[in-house]
Image (cartoon, rainbow, N blue to C red):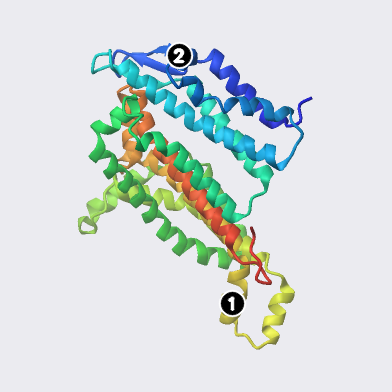
Amino acid sequence: MIRNRVLFVLAAAIAVAALALPFLSFAPNRLLSGQGIALAAALEMPRGLALLAPGAVLLAVPFLRPSRGATAASVAAALLVGAGLLWLAGLHAAELAATAPPAARTSFGSGFWAMEAAALLAALDGARRLGLPAPGRIALGLATALLLAAPLAAGQLDQLSILKEYANRRDAFSDAVLRHGAIVAAALVPTLALGLPLGVLAQRRPTVGRLLFPVLNIVQTIPSIALFGLMLAPLSALSAAFPSLGIAGVGMAPAVIALTLYSLLPIVRNTAAGLDGVPEPVREAARGMGMTPAQLFLRVDVPLALPVLLAGFRITLVQAVGLAAVAALIGAGGLGAIMFQGLFANALDLVLLGAVPVILLALAADALLRLAEALLPLPGGRRAV
């Protein structure tokens, strides 16, 4: 009898991917399509089976009686499987590189990505079922990061194509990460400077909200590439008219303006919603204590609305991290530039070198801000953990 259907489906997905999809792909060079390598070939290596032995636990737990111990075992097994897949891929890539020409490339196959995703989802499902408090979630997140980073730190993945692409572009990659962060940070400053006052105004003046939100909703419906393109003509004209401003039709300026326009809606809406959620009796009590309007806003409205405000900021930050990659099309640089270089050169691992850090940055931003939301004090001094 299946007692944990979610874990059963994820474990079955791992099994199907292991049998039906290529674990790795081996090609003579970075431009040619690779030949698929089954997981069975990698498991023939010494320690191959040992690295994936925890997978047996994932297959067994769905049939066990639900308990905290079984759930904890599934989380540990899923994380070990995820790390084991990385170790195994790196070891087999090193074995292939020992007899292959220098131009040869070994890449992750579709089976690897499917199994890795299923393993991490199984760990996430188990963590949710455990109902860990904030310190436990922090510890689990750190353990996951350490397990997955261990083969990378040990140099076991150096023979994989994506790491070879990184080695060839180490300095350019570092510059791209910094540039990407600069684009996001530069967009968040005007977003907060404009969005917070507009949100307060929309909450206090419903007429303003009825006019403002439709406009911001329309901006959200414009495709990102189109919005970046729309910035080119007016900014080019402005640059020609006032060259001393140093604003060009391409580069950082249109990227920051477009990202700011995209980011306004969640900030404005959540600011208004957070202030709307402050109970009116609380405001009346504060007025009865003699608080001025400014004191009421800073000491009552803002603290009580802060969780909703922080949720809006989280949405904005994650969205900006992703959209900043598209800004590379108008010369803004960042990790998107590496992605598009890979697309134009038909080099998948170069695309991944730009895309994977964007995903990791977005996940890290989301996790940190979710943790901050959980640690916010609630009325009465409690914390949302």
The residue nearer to you, when weighing 307 against 129, is 129
Which residue bears the numbered disc 1? 299
The kind of secondary structure element at disc 1 is: helix
Query: If you read the primary sequence from the N terminus, does the residue marked by circle 2 or circle 1 appear first?
Result: 2
Q: Is residue 59 left or right of residue 241?
A: right
Which residue bears the numbered disc 2? 44
| Residue 44 vertical position relative to residue 91 in the rendered view, above or below | above
Residue 4 lies in quadrant: top right
Quadrant of the drawing holding the C terminus: bottom right
Q: Is residue 369 left or right of residue 190?
A: right
- Tell me the crowding category of disc 2: few under 14, some 14 to 19, or many 20 or more residues within 10 angstroms, Cα based: few
The residue nearer to you, when weighing 283 against 176, is 176
- Residue depicted at x 62% and y 85%: 291
Q: Amino acid at mark 2?
A: Glu
| Residue 241 vertical position relative to residue 116 in the rendered view, above or below | below
Identify the residue at the far bottom of this view.
Answer: 290
- Residue depicted at x 31% and y 36%: 337
Residue 57 lies in quadrant: top right
Mark 2 vs mark 1: in front: 2
* Residue 226: image location, x then y, percent: 42, 38
Quadrant of the drawing holding the N terminus: top right
* Residue 271: image location, x then y, percent: 58, 62
* Residue 105: image location, x then y, percent: 31, 19
The kind of secondary structure element at disc 2 is: loop
Q: Is residue 9 left or right of residue 153?
A: right
Q: Amino acid at mark 1?
A: Arg
| Residue 137 vertical position relative to residue 90 in the rendered view, above or below | below
> Pointers 2 and 1 in contact (CB under 8 A)?
no
Real-space Cα distance between discs 2 and 1?
Answer: 65 Å
- Residue depicted at x 39% and y 19%: 92
- Tell me the crowding category of disc 1: few under 14, some 14 to 19, or many 20 or more residues within 10 angstroms, Cα based: few
Could you say which disc has been placed on residue 286 in the image? none
